[in-house]
Image: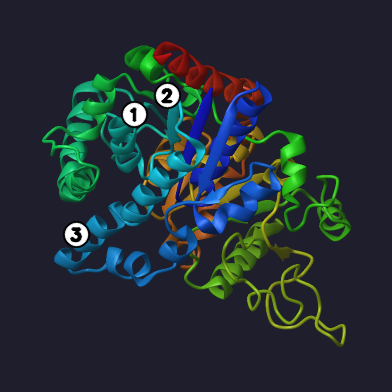
Amino acid sequence: MRHVMALVGSRGDVQPALAVALELRRRGHEVVTGVAPNLVPLAGRLGLDPVPLGIDSAALLGSDLVRRDMRSAHPVRRVRALRAVASAGWDELRTGLLALLDDVGGADTVVTGLLGQEVAAAVAERRGLAMAALHYCPVRANGVVSPVSGVRGPGATRAVWALGERVRWGLTRRAENAQRAELGLGGTRVHLPTRLRDAGAVEVQAYDPALAPGLADEWGPGRPLTGFLALDDDARARLGEAGAGSGGGLDAGLDGWLDDGEPPVYVGFGSMPVADPAALVAAVDAACADLGVRALVSAGWNDFSGAAGPGGPGGAAGPDGAAGPGPDAKRVRVVGAVDHAAVLPRCRAAVHHGGAGTTAAALRAGLPAVVGWYSADQPMWGDLLRGAGVGVARRASTLTQPGVLAGALTEVLDDATAARAAALGARLVPADRAVAAAADALTRLSDDRA
């Protein structure tokens, strides 16, 4: 079988799907991998021979459209920005995916993530191919998980989802029908979830059923809950993250710092843009001083080079050996991207943006969490962790305000919360089983269409 994977968005949108691509290849399937241009090196280090597809996701996340207009106080500007972001890169994705299919001589399935699935579904329809999507959080109407904090009960939850689907369709309908017209397809008045269901598409729910009990029964085999997807040890070692040694472990400096004291709090926001890195590091340092804890701060996609004093990332001393402005180097260490699977088990809690990948890594490590959310599914993950008794949620922009981070950490740095987090982590579907289940779903889809 030949699977063409069209994976756009941030690293958190792409990396879980790459684990499935590797598993399909291990089983003898042919996998053609298209990823956002800025993530080609990442997929390349995994040996997947990727091709660039769509637009640079880091540039989009750092653009004025996302950082300014989507947060505008002016409602018209904000709606225009939401509509623009919802369909950003669709032309490039359509033309790139068509060219990719032509280059490889067709495919059995088109596999995508949540982002860009409108375009991928239209291309699959035009070419008569099976369609599959990987969802890293609940995004379809249900009576179990609400997309809005505070809503309880199946009826109210379904009503909120119905409203959300109408809003999403209102934002994307014009752009989606424009893509269909470019492909020679007729316009549609039916939103994507219904069309995918009617077409027999599989929407793999790549998160753990323990966090959404009852959802698997409600949705059935067309939307199987597999568990959180993650790369195996060999694949992670090939990525060679900053802070990771060539064998997949940590470099000596970070390894020694972790050993030289109590397990720290991990702080990292992945691909999310941190507006003021220096202010965030200062807030982390103040919280650590108040609570008597240490913190490891990961810059992710951000530039924290000026946030840790003259020593830069790592919190080292200045050239003369004296500590410069910035956090106490023994209390707070600032690093670049790190291997979550190697670092988080050596921490006691995590402060993160609530992306599905980081949420999963922290849960697997048995850590309680403070979710400093920005948008999209992140508030939902904050609610789910709070409901499970293993986390709290705050808007990310508030974490630099005096006392906010320390207060949030106080809520999760207790023995009872730690015990609940450890117990939940032990119940999660192991990553290898989750990846295998996702690959099984894609294989069945291909076999059914054969």
Tally of numbered discs: 3
Residue 34 visible at all = yes
Do labels 3 and 2 touch, CB within 8 Å? no
Residue 270 visible at all = no
Q: Which mark is residue 79?
A: 3
Q: Which amino acid, mark 2?
A: Ala
Of 242 and 344, nearer the camera is 242
- How did the renderer colour the structure? rainbow
Q: Which residue is mark 2?
A: 212
Residue under the point 70% across and 53% down? 338
Do labels 1 and 2 touch, CB within 8 Å? yes
Q: Neighbour class for label 3 at 10 Å: few (<14), some, many (≥20)?
A: some
Residue under the point 37% across and 52% down? 375
Q: Which amino acid, mark 1?
A: Val
Where on the picture, by quarter, is residue 168?
top left
Q: Secondary structure at mark 1?
A: loop
Give coordinates of residue 435: x percent, y percent.
59, 25
Q: Neighbour class for label 1 at 10 Å: few (<14), some, many (≥20)?
A: many
For this view, does 422 lie left or right of residue 6?
Answer: right
Q: Which residue is mark 1?
A: 145
Distance Cα–Cα, label 3 vs label 1 = 25 Å
Give coordinates of residue 323: x percent, y percent.
79, 80
Distance Cα–Cα, label 1 vs label 2 = 7 Å
Dot 3 or dot 2: first in sequence order is 3
Residue under the point 37% across and 27% down? 129
Instruction: Tell which residue pokes out farthest to the left in this image.
Output: 189
